[in-house]
Amino acid sequence: MSFFDEPEETRTAPRTAPRRRRSSGGPRRPRGANDQAILIRRIVLAVAVIIAIVLIAVLVNSCQVNARNSALKDYNNSVASLNAQSVATGERFFNTMSGGTGDPTAMQQSLNQSLGEAENQLSKAKGLSVPDEVKGAQQYFVSALQQRSDGIRGVAGQVQPALQSQTAQDAVNSIAADMARFYSSDVLYKDYAVPQIIGALRAAGITVGGVDGQQVNSSQFLPSIDWLDPAIVATTLKAPVPAAASSKPIAPGLHGHQLNSVSVGGTQLTTGSTNSIPASPAPTFTLNFANTGTNTETNVKCKVTISGSKVSGETTVPQTTAGESTSCQVTLGAIPPKGSQQVTADIVPVPGEHNKANNSLTFPVNFQ
């Protein structure tokens, strides 16, 4: 074997030393400091989220409140407008009825026109957007307009028979009965619908009355309780019915009433201390009284007066029954003067009534 034929030695790769990690150039932060920083960031984030949620909730609630208040105002304005239109229809209706029978054909056409207006107003009332707070008021309002429409329809259908001698008496009685629908409609609207609307507005923090407050229409449809008397209807229409006796003899037995209490807006007034009542809109007084006699009484008048003022109110109850209690609602004809006043409520004595000491109550009232 020659020198050049020597076997080659096995070569092994040289070991390489492990690389040393480069330092980041600064002291290494302890693990606890990192955890604390993360916790602080999480707390700040959570607080920010909570604040955002609260702000959103406040904004949503504010929007809901504004929407609710706007809906209540719109509803009140719609009701006030429709009632004003209804009362205007009533004025034309009663003007037509008071015109006598100068032209029966023109009279019938005018009554039919009033009926069309009343039906249109009823349809609009049924189509109103009604907030939940005034659902009950809406039912009373629709019922009131329904009674007005039905009453005009009934009267319009009986006017021509009332002018014929063979059918005059029954027709006149039917017309007087239909007039009672108008009285009932005013009770439903003024004593039930309006107070509920006012209550809902005030509960929502909305001002009622005054220069900047919501205006509530409390006008009534029936101009006088006299229209419920068949004799008045017959005389007005010049219907050919037997003339009624000028006066009736007083029935034997006891006659009279006793005024038991007076309230405003569901709050009973007291005679021994000052009662605070809003002056606007013109308040409605509820007089609770009883027939303490032994006879049925008709056309019983209820009055409310303010001492030293021309502001007063009056209404008539068609009938009271012996031994039974009833009530009447009297709305002042104008806004009373503000401040301390003496308010007197009366049940006007009926023919044959001797004990009149319990017919009246007087209250100290501070109109605000």
Image (spheres, helix red, strand yellow):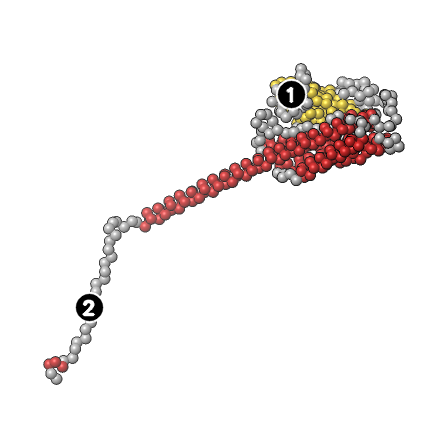
Q: Position of residue 9 (x, y in %)?
A: 17, 76
**Which element type, helix, strand or loop, lies under badge 2?**
loop
Q: Residue at x 42, y 44 (%)?
A: 46
Q: Report how many numbered discs are placed on residues in the image.
A: 2
Which is more toward the observer, 248 or 115? 115
Q: What residue is shown with label 2?
A: 14
Quarter of the image where one finds residue 257? top right
**Which element type, helix, strand or loop, lies under badge 1?**
loop
Q: Amino acid at mark 2?
A: Pro
The residue carrying pointer 1 sits among few (fewer than 14), some (14 to 19) or many (20 or more) residues within 10 Å by Cα, namely many
The residue carrying pointer 2 sits among few (fewer than 14), some (14 to 19) or many (20 or more) residues within 10 Å by Cα, namely few
Q: Residue at x 74, y 23 (%)?
A: 302
Q: Position of residue 87 (x, y in %)?
A: 70, 30
User: How far is the residue under mark 2 from the one under mark 1?
Assistant: 116 Å
Residue 245 in sight here: yes
Q: Position of residue 262 (x, y in %)?
A: 70, 24
Q: Sequence-wise, which precedes: disc 2 or disc 1?
A: 2
Q: Amino acid at mark 1?
A: Pro
Q: Residue at x 35, y 46 (%)?
A: 37
Q: What residue is shown with label 1?
A: 336
